[in-house]
Amino acid sequence: MSVSLKGDQPFENVPSVKAKALRINLNEHIYGTFAEIGAGQEVARHFFRSGGASGTIAKTMSAYDKAFSDAIYGQETNSGYVSESRLNKMLDYEINLLEDRMSRKKHPNKMFFTYANTVATIDFAKKYKGHGWMGIKFQTNSKEAYSEIHIHVRFHSFEAKAQQEALGLMGLNLIYGAFYKHNEPRKLLRYLFDHIDPDAIEIDTINFSGPLFNEVDNRLMSLELVKNGMTEAVMFGPDGNNILPARVLWKKDILAIRGSFRPVTLVNEDMYLKSKEIISKDENFNEKNLINLFEITLSNLRSTNGDGDVNEEDFMDRAKLLCALGQTVMITNFKEYYRLAEYFSNYTQNQVVLTMGVNNLIEIFDEKYYDDLRGGILEAFGKLFVKKLRIFLYPIETKDGIIINSNNIHVANKMKNLYKYFKSNKILIDIKKYNEKLLKIYSFKVLKKIKNGKSGWEKMLPEEVTNQIKSKKLFGYK
């Protein structure tokens, strides 16, 4: 006989902290272990305090000492101890130990789980706020394979106690959500912040895996994080799985191209290839240290839907194309470029290149763009043009056939001296070896042709993009 949680009714409204822990404890079929290193037994204590934990908790542990932790889970080489690699080892080790020590013959209806976290809270000098990984490996049917949820968090509070409390609550919410909201992953995501100050902690990476989440696309879950204000930026790789921005960007050279990519055109491809060609001529260029990012802003995604919401089918069409091209995709809530540059500066002091079209550059030099900043455009430029940042400018062609680049672009009179400064200091660089034949290609015109069933659009896109649109019926292709 197997036992399932399907059909179990949730508490009305938002259950209290104690109610959530108690509901887990009083379910005689839920049974598992807690392994928490780096920030104490913050999650497990909620279950002990609520009562009835003896039937739920098999073991709690905190291998706080590095040597002792290595003796249990093995050493970490490249990824460090506060890493997803460490989290995986902890989850696998503890669930295997649970299976070994608890006979399925004696406990046929037990639904096993292991919760683990590896966390570094704020340091004594309060210069490093801290971050960590948490995850759960679990089953909601005693006969099924395990499913997993992995989360990376960043702390924003400056007090270690507040960070530990936020961690404990989020861990509790994760366990509760795994068992009672696994069939509604979007709600599960939102409920992770139950009873937590949303400004205290940030989730910048989440991945669902296993049989319970076969229908979940982690790229959509990544988008949900940005939509819900749980983070400002997320990334996913060519395989479609979400990746930790800090791990990808740390001490890297960055080439970022912002666009709608709806769809990816030959212009986008040319911008990318020509930018990379310029970078490759730098004296200290190292291909292995360069990360290429195709960035889409949330405002761009929302602009495709009249009601202000994100058209998820449209988003997925873009995501599938970029992943098929082998690109790393970044979704941000950074409408202004200076916020993107500021974000990158948190992770690298190496060179950052922003490739953009003329219209984007004109917007950067428009004072109205910075109405929300007390220091206006000067404050924004102080954040935008950080050390080693350059802008590569791709030209446009007017209806009259005039090529607009950095030499004949129009900016407001009072901005001209500022513009000249950045141009003369080689912060602004024209992409010169562009393909002039491509300047007449606009993605919105391509999209219109695709949706109206007209021919000729194929020649405006990279061959792989055309193949993907036809084979997967993207962007309304029939």
Image: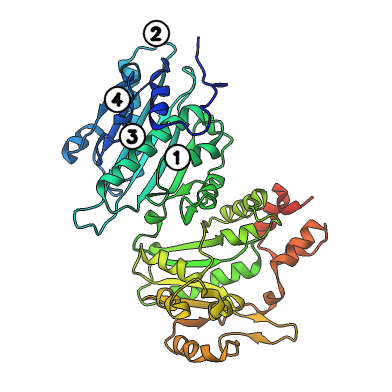
What kind of element bears circle 4?
helix
Q: Quadrant of residue 302?
A: bottom right
Q: Please give the residue where the numbered disc 3 appears in the rendered image.
A: 116
Query: Is residue 244 visible to us here?
Result: yes
- Of the numbered discs 1 and 3, the one sitting upstream in the chain is 3
In this rendering, would 408 be left or right of 129?
Answer: right
Residue mark closest to the camera, 2 vs 1 = 1
Identify which amino acid the numbered label 1 is placed on.
Leu
Between 436 and 421, the residue placed more toward the observer is 421
x and y percentages locating residue 95 in the rendered image? 35, 26
Q: Please give the residue where the numbered disc 4 appears in the rendered image.
A: 48
- Residue 192 badge: 1
Q: Which residue occupies 57% across, 77% down?
A: 363
x and y percentages locating residue 97 in the rendered image? 30, 23
Estimate the spatial distance between the alpha carbons at disc 1 and disc 3, rounded to whole Å: 16 Å
Estimate the spatial distance between the alpha carbons at disc 2 and disc 4, rounded to whole Å: 28 Å
Estimate the spatial distance between the alpha carbons at disc 3 and disc 4, rounded to whole Å: 16 Å
- Of the numbered discs 3 and 2, the one sitting upstream in the chain is 2
Q: Please give the residue where the numbered disc 2 appears in the rendered image.
A: 105
Residue 349 drawn above or below residue 166: below
Identify which amino acid the numbered label 2 is placed on.
Lys
